[in-house]
Image (cartoon, coloured by chain):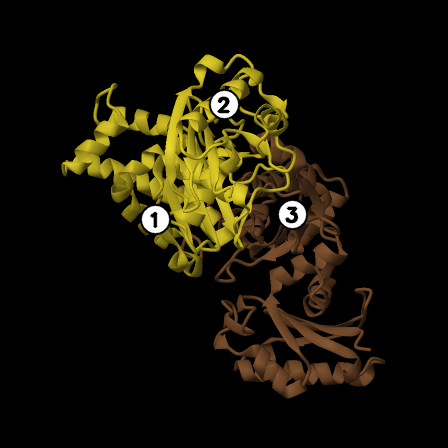
Chain colours: A brown, B yellow
């Protein structure tokens, strides 16, 4: 019985791998630094293939127990053809037939997916979004992204480019964004902007968001206020998508979401104030539950074609 | 053979009715003023029932040729239960079991739908959106609304409230909106705001948008510039939804869209400049094709459950 799936989560700094069992639990894991294999797509795919083989050597389930490999990648992924269109933060990736190459190396079926969609699928089927047919899963980190589950299906858009909530403009003449636009949500609530804001608020250039989180946990008012104000910004960034898509819940994940307890009240309050009554009254703001495993567990769903 | 459908389009000023044939053509029509029957929901539904009977008396297809009646209403419509939840601009409508009441009066199957969704369905199946699986149909008028076709299905949202693109905020501290929010798209590109802007630009308090349209048609530069700048605003209002939903096309309908030829270039230019590359390169901005008949023709699709 092919009861196991291998999940691979490719990030800018590390590649994480995990064997996921039929219950959606990660039973074995490994990781390696992305940097060493950034030279060519072929080098990274070979490194992934080797890591899979090592993982299967040491683990109880062997290759014959594995139904498939699901790989989440940070970029534009043509899910139907298994081709990586572009990875904005890893140079040299353009129209790479990832699925074909990895399948040839390992002789195991491969599915590839955008990393945020993978996390969304994981949270939807095994995490905070279980049983919910319409949800948005946002990741607050260096980038601000989102996966959309609409009518009980992941919605990718015809160009596999849907979900770019970080690039919804919040101001007509806002600050310039790396995407080419102005005033993008990410320019207000992305990690970099929040860090700058924290440096200003705490008059300390080297303060980290982790430190601000720690201080909030200790009950420091200034830190609590910082997260409260961040939540207002996140809330404003969500009003548009709440009014357009009328989701039942918004799952908050990513690094910044560690401060969820301090963010949630002001996110919800802002949506209640600024979004339309029907939409605002229906939407719950909840915390992602699977942490770093979401992408690995999403792979299980992708391979097993569960709804 | 039940080859005909009756479409009913309920607006704040008039109720339009039409008999639609199997090809999606309106073969017979009538209308009456909404105002006279605004007293109670029952009064308006009775008036609609009577108008249907009159329409069928005079027309070739009789009641036995009619597969059903599709009614578009300007508000929050529970499509599954056939209940009008609320009509914001017609007082006294709250949880009205419209479908049940009209079916009892006429003994013909009835489906009800939000008016903008009805227009969207019509344009998608018989108009500008034919054959397109992912599109947004926006109506630029007193209100700014939208219908969403995603993965070849109309997307209504779990509370039937999706598509409220007019209430996407374009500014964090924008002008207060009737919906309770601030800086809503509608406050920039709705009929009322555009009329105010026109009065300012042309230094004429009584100038109408129709007049500005006429002047643009005559090649008057100031009028052309007015529509060009309006197109920039509309474009900015669309950037967010283009980045989030990655639609193949945006259909522009409603009264303001009469000036489509003057609006389109700057809408497209603004999206090209400010939206993400993949999304911007895929999306076409096209003009609604069915005019006032869109809602009636949408009724045909709704009743015949065509995809």
Q: Quadrant of the C terminus of chain A?
A: bottom right
Return the chain for callout 3.
Answer: A
Who is closer to the viewer here, B152 or A31?
A: B152
Q: Quadrant of the N terminus of chain A?
A: bottom right
- The secondary structure type at the circle numbered 2 is helix
Q: Residue at x 81, y 68 (%)?
A: A22
Asked whether the viewer can see residue B172, the reply is: no
Above or below for B27 versus B86: below
Q: Are marks 3 and 2 on the same chain?
A: no
Asked whether the viewer can see residue B120, the reply is: yes
The residue indicated by pointer 2 is B48
Q: Are marks 1 and 3 in contact (CB under 8 Å)?
A: no
- The secondary structure type at the circle numbered 3 is loop
Q: How many marks?
A: 3
The residue indicated by pointer 1 is B286
Q: Position of residue A206 (x, y in %)?
A: 60, 55
Between marks 3 and 2, how big is the CA–CA gap? 35 Å
């Amino acid at each position: 019985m092919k009861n196991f799936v291998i999940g691979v989560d490719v990030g800018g700094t590390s590649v994480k791998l995990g064997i996921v069992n039929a219950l959606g639990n990660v039973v074995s894991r490994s990781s390696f630094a992305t940097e060493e294999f950034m030279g060519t797509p072929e080098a990274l795919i070979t490194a992934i293939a080797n890591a899979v083989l090592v993982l299967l050597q040491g683990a109880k389930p062997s290759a014959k127990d594995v139904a498939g490999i699901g790989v989440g990648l940070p970029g534009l992924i043509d899910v139907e053809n298994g081709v990586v269109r572009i990875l904005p933060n890893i140079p040299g990736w353009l129209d790479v037939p990832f699925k074909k190459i990895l399948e040839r190396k390992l002789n195991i079926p491969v599915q590839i997916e955008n990393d945020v969609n993978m996390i969304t699928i994981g949270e939807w089927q095994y995490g905070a979004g279980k049983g919910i047919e319409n949800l948005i899963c946002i990741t607050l980190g260096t980038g601000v992204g989102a996966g959309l589950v609409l009518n009980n299906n992941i919605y990718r858009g015809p160009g596999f480019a849907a979900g770019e909530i970080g690039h919804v403009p919040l101001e007509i003449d806002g600050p310039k964004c790396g995407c080419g636009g102005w005033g993008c949500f990410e320019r207000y609530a992305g990690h970099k902007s929040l860090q700058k804001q924290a440096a200003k608020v705490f008059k300390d250039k080297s303060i980290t968001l982790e430190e601000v989180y720690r201080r909030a946990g200790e009950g420091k008012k200034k830190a609590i206020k910082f997260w409260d104000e961040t939540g207002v910004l996140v809330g404003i960034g969500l009003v548009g998508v709440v009014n357009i898509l009328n989701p039942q819940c918004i799952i908050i994940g990513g690094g910044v979401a560690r401060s969820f307890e301090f963010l949630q009240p002001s996110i919800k309050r802002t949506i209640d104030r600024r979004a339309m009554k029907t939409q605002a009254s229906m939407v719950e703001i909840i915390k992602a539950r699977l942490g770093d495993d979401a992408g690995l567990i999403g792979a299980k769903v992708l391979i097993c074609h569960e709804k």
